[in-house]
Image (cartoon, grey):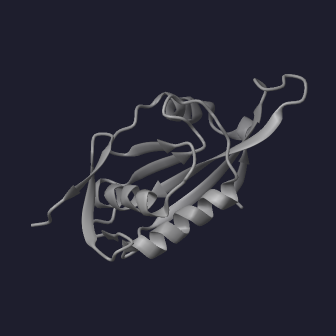
Amino acid sequence: MNKDKFENFDPETFQSLLKSKEDTRLDRKLKITSREKIAKTIAAMANTEGGQLLVGISDHGKLIGIDPEEEMYMIRTANEKYCHPPAKLSFRTIQYLDYDTNPIEPLEKYFLIVGIAKSPGINCFDKKGNSKYYVRKNDRTVSVVRT
C-alpha cells in the first residue's frame, strides 16, 4: 500500500482538497457502497477531463476515515467489471491522526485519493448488460447519447 503520513502531506494541497468544491474534476465519497454507481463516476470523469475521487472525506470536507484496502478493492473491481475499456486509475493512501476524537491518544485514520486519467470512450455497463456513456457536468455524473 502506498501510504503517506498525514504530517508529510503537503499542507497547501491538503487544505485545498478539503476546501475545494466538487466539480467536473473532483468528487468526494464517504465510502464506496455500490460498484455500479462508482463505475459511473469513474467513467464520467475519464470521459470528461479526468480528475480525483476522494474517499473517506464528506461532501463538506470532514475527514471520516476508511479502510483503504477495502475501498481500493471496490473501486478496482467496479472499474474492471462495469467500465469498458477500464479507466486508468492511480491510488494514494493518506494516513492521518484524528485528534478530535481523542486528543490524548489520537486515532490513526486513512483517506484515499484516486486519480482518474482522461481517456474518452469509456462505456459503463449496468448489471443487465446495458451500455451507457457518462460525462461530468459540474458536480454531477450524467448519461449522454454519443454522436
Q: Position of residue 107 (x, y in %)?
A: 82, 36
Residue extending furthest front?
128
Q: Nearer the viewer, residue 64 or 87?
A: 64
Q: Nearer the viewer, residue 87 or 70?
A: 70
For the point 34% across and 39% down, the residue is: 23
Q: Residue 116 vs residue 65: left or right?
A: left
Q: Quadrant of residue 125?
A: bottom left
Q: Quadrant of residue 116?
A: bottom left
For the point 33% across and 77% down, the residue is: 129
Image quadrant containing the N terminus? bottom right
Q: Is residue 33 above or below residue 139?
A: below
Q: Residue 141 vs residue 4: left or right?
A: left
For the point 61% across and 57% down, the residue is: 71
Q: Is residue 74 above or below residue 103?
A: below
For the point 28% across and 40% down, the residue is: 138
Q: Residue 57 vs residue 39: left or right?
A: right
Q: Position of residue 54 (x, y in %)?
A: 53, 45
Total marks drawn?
Answer: 0
Q: Position of residue 134 (x, y in %)?
A: 27, 59
Image quadrant containing the C terminus? bottom left
Q: Position of residue 12 (x, y in %)?
A: 56, 30
